[in-house]
Image (spheres, rainbow, N blue to C red):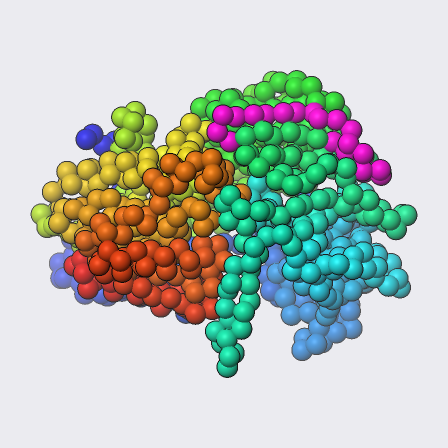
Amino acid sequence: MKIKHFAGVVAAALLTLGTPAVAQETAPMKEFTLEDLNFGGTNYRNMIPQSRRLTWWGDQLVRLEAKECYLVDKKTGKETVLFTVDNVNEWMGGTPDKGLRSLSGARFLYADQPLVLLNYVGERCLIDFEQKKLVWHQSSADERQASAFNTVSRHTAYVSGDQLYFRSADFDKSDIQLTTDGSREIVYGQSVHRNEFGIHDGLFWSPDGMRLAFYRMDQSMVADYPQVNLFPRIAENEPDKYPMAGETSHKVTVGVYDVATNKTIYLKAGDPTDRYFTNVAWSPDAKTIYMLELNRDQNDCRLVSYDAVTGDRIAELYRETDAKYVEPQNPIQFLPWDANKFILQSQKDGYNHLYLFDKNGKELRQITEGDWVVLSVVGFNTKNKSIIITSNECNPIQCNTWEVNVNTGKRTLLDNGEGWHTPSLSASGRYLVDSYQAPEVPRNIEITDAKTLRRTVYFESPNPWEGYKVPQFSCGTVKAADGTTDLYWRMVKPADFDETKKYPTVIYVYGGPHAHNVDARWNYASRSWETYMAQKGYITFILDNRGSENRGKEFEQATFRQLGQQEMLDQMCGVEYLKSLPYVDADRIGVHGWSYGGFMTISLITNYPEVFKVGVAGGPVIDWKWYEVMYGERYMDTPQDNPEGYAKCSLLPMAKNLKGKLQIITGYNDSTVVPQHCLMFIEECIKAGTQPDFFAYPGEGHNMMGHKSVHLHERITQYFEDYLK
């Protein structure tokens, strides 16, 4: 199998400048610990690339530190102090022990005014830092479950004790309770549909801040999953509402609260049974609400407009269907310079691109096109009538920033054309803060003038691994099982790699939708655990199979109705490549993954028991009938409609095939992949006489938090040390 390398190796090297007459002693290279490498470790913060906390004040750039705010000169990068935390406490009459302690959360929301928004001793405060005084304040208490602040009206909506409240910009007015029936079964103002379809919030202010749209989710009909709190003297029942594939799901409606009338109406969207309402957006004049509405089969998506005053349905503006599924992820966005036109993101031509519509739903043109993906809309440049986007047009594993003219579609690259860029746009859209990484660049930050394309180097992170035994990182492609599609891989080798030796090799796998492992960030986005394993003498190999993200609809939908099947075939193409390498010990190949990667781990070790000697599966899906409605049915349909697919993908019948050593790990209170998955697989292993190992973390969810993550990764490592090395 041929392999294509497109980038070199990142390796630790000792450079000799001249030949000294006398041998010089050099300090020994340090070794990593999990306290250095793991996010829960005590030294982790010192081992990641440094950055700078930057924010925009209109077109002015501000750096935030705990004790000071600095104004940054965009042409030179030089900084001057704007104000300090001591200044704020002096202006507010506070003291360091009772007043503000950090400016890191400061927000400059008004482009043309010297105002900073701070949360000061339980209050939301606007301070004029030129006049050096408080100009407005509002309580910020009780905003525990959700909150949304509107810049224009300065009103706040929040959820506390499961009830929705309105908090006026007028400090003297009492909060208004908008609901009375909120509970664990009736959920207001929070994310719904289990955070699918790009949903992250449940409160949506109109542009003028005088109307609030909000989600109401009735999940009283959804079955409880019996989670248990083990920590009290007598364990307590703490059930989760968990709608499993093919079972009854919740019902969502959208309410609208009018500040002027103090009344609430609900959008007349019809029966919410087996429907998804997502990507709520407002018209610029705050009179119309737009939603993308999806049927339960998720193959019929419609953009619908509603009257925000009456709740009446106005019109269906757009409809998209697909033989497999439609997956809306972004709300429509109106052009700042033309309130009669909006952009919509869609994969209808095979890749996620931008389309221009008028407000009546007439498609005017496709703005971007090509065999690449628009990754995000960063913002707009009003003067140029352009959109700032990120895309992977330069390379499938890169993320670069472009300016796209709405009228002509002409694209202008705004960065260096390499690596992975995360831009932040100024108010006018002319300036960008461009934070980026590349395989050999820990992090650089540049300030870009989109008009002149001048890039000012503002910050370059030192290599946090200087002085350590850094492994060798490389990247390349291998053909997928279809024989034509390029799949990207990453390999991590020990620092003292010797190609004449044979090494145990661990395949790290995820493989599922909406994720990827390999990209052009520092060290090709390598997970720090791979460095730890390389230090212990292993090679790790990571492959993004078909079904993973950012490669277009056909690539992503290849797994439809048969999760795990095409992915395994692609992963085995990676295995065949590994076997072709003289330094990979084909008798010592292991596999590890978490969540979807746990599913893939058990799939691989039971379908190919002659290949994989050891596996560690974390939080694994075992049978998709126990997974949630929205995600599970999108990719598998229901168990009733696709019984053959569910049977084919289930790992329960595969328990009898286990030959190698397998450790299964779960958070005992996992509310994403519930423990039923692991336990039922173990039950099948008992019946079959196979012997997996099992470990559970009491009280933990789908991922181990804090320092428990260090314990987890030491456990994973030790399992390979015990049985693969």
Residue 458: x and y in percent read 52, 47
Q: Is residue 376 magenta?
A: no
Residue 478: x and y in percent read 26, 33
Kindly identify the residue that appears in the image at 51 percent across and 49 percent down.
244
Where the N terminus falls, by quadrant?
top left
Where the C terminus falls, by quadrant?
bottom left
Q: Is residue 322 magenta?
A: yes
Q: Nearer the viewer, residue 113 or 22?
A: 113
Furthest toward the bottom, the residue is 233
Kindly identify the residue that appears in the image at 47 percent across and 35 percent down.
641
Residue 124: x and y in percent read 75, 61
In the displayed structure image, the side of residue 105 where residue 237 appears, left or right = left
In the displayed structure image, the side of residue 240 where residue 682 appears, left or right = left
Kindly identify the residue that appears in the image at 50 percent across and 68 percent down.
228
Magenta stretch in the rendered image = 305-325
In the rendered view, would you say 296 is above or below 79? above
| Residue 606 at least partly seen | yes
In the rendered view, would you say 102 is above or below 306? below
Which image quadrant for residue 534? bottom left
Residue 95: x and y in percent read 71, 76
Could you tell me how many numbered marks the image carries? 0
In the displayed structure image, the side of residue 361 where residue 441 appears, left or right = left
| Residue 76 at least partly seen | no
